Amino acid sequence: MAQVGDTITYTFSDGSSVAEDISNIDEIEIDYVDGPGGGTAVGTGGAGGRVENVVADVSESSTLYIWVGGAGGSTNTRSGGAKGIGRYDGGDGTSGAYDGSAGGGGTSEVSLQNTEASDSATEPFIAAAGGGGGGDGDAITGGAGGARGRAISEGNSPPLGGVGGGGNAEGSVDGHSGTQATITGSGTTVSGGGSAAEKNGEIQVTYKQSVPDAPSNLNAEVQ
């Protein structure tokens, strides 16, 4: 269970969600969500997107779900690199006559719903960062796209995953449709500001208790 004042850094494991008990938490600050990079072949993979300093009221929720995306697979052979996994997966690299193309990275996401990509093409989220595009294999077999909204990858944007061939990815912040989370500070998004090529994603969250407003019917006097 997350405690008030905790700052927890989540790293990639297997791409599945981590459930954090937030029943005693009123507010979270998502310090950053870094999408993973794409794999590298002949060309270097793209960087993941980044979202930082997002504040959300989660006082009506009891569980936070966190996915940390994995980097796309690199290759220096004719075989294609494996896709990176996350809430949404990047694309698989393809084999080539000379060198195969690399895989695209998966997404890193923070959500109040533990649904997976197979349930819907447009899963809700609080903050998310796409994976980078995989590196070029050769002129015939360009790298795979990063997750969410690029060729041969899973999911619809936003955020927009990196273009196959080494393109950087983007991040996105959204109100959480169908739940009680309210975005009170939208933070910033940085295209290509997440993890570099071949590096897994990372997420850091600070758990807070919101400070109530002073009662409006009280007057303070200086003694």
Image (cartoon, rainbow, N blue to C red):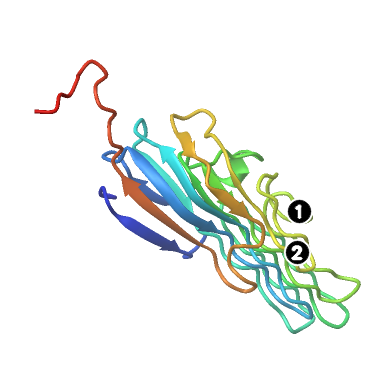
Taking the spot 54% from the left edge, 30% from the top edge, the residue there is 177
Query: What element does badge 1 sit on?
Result: loop
Residue 116's spot in the image, x, y percent?
Answer: 55, 45
Compared across the picture, whether 67 is left or right of 132 comes to left
Rendered-image quadrant of the C terminus: top left
In the picture of the structure, the residue carrying the numbered disc 2 is: 167
- State which quadrant residue 135 falls in: bottom right
**Rendered position, 120 above or below 97:** above
Pick the front one: 217 or 182: 217
Task: Count the marks.
Answer: 2
In the picture of the structure, the residue carrying the numbered disc 1 is: 150
Q: Which numbered circle lies on residue 201? A: none
- State which quadrant residue 69 falls in: bottom right
Residue 36's spot in the image, x, y percent?
Answer: 59, 64
Residue 72's spot in the image, x, y percent?
Answer: 65, 68
Q: How crowded is mark 1: few (under 14 residues within 10 Å), some or many (20 or more)?
A: many
**Rendered position, 125 above or below 135:** above
Query: What element does badge 2 sit on?
Result: loop
Question: Which residue is farthest right?
Answer: 140
**Residue 16 in sight in this render:** no
**Callout 1 touching callout 2 (CB < 8 Å):** yes
Pick the front one: 75 or 136: 136
Q: Distance between the residues labelled 1 and 2?
A: 10 Å
Pick the front one: 68 or 209: 209
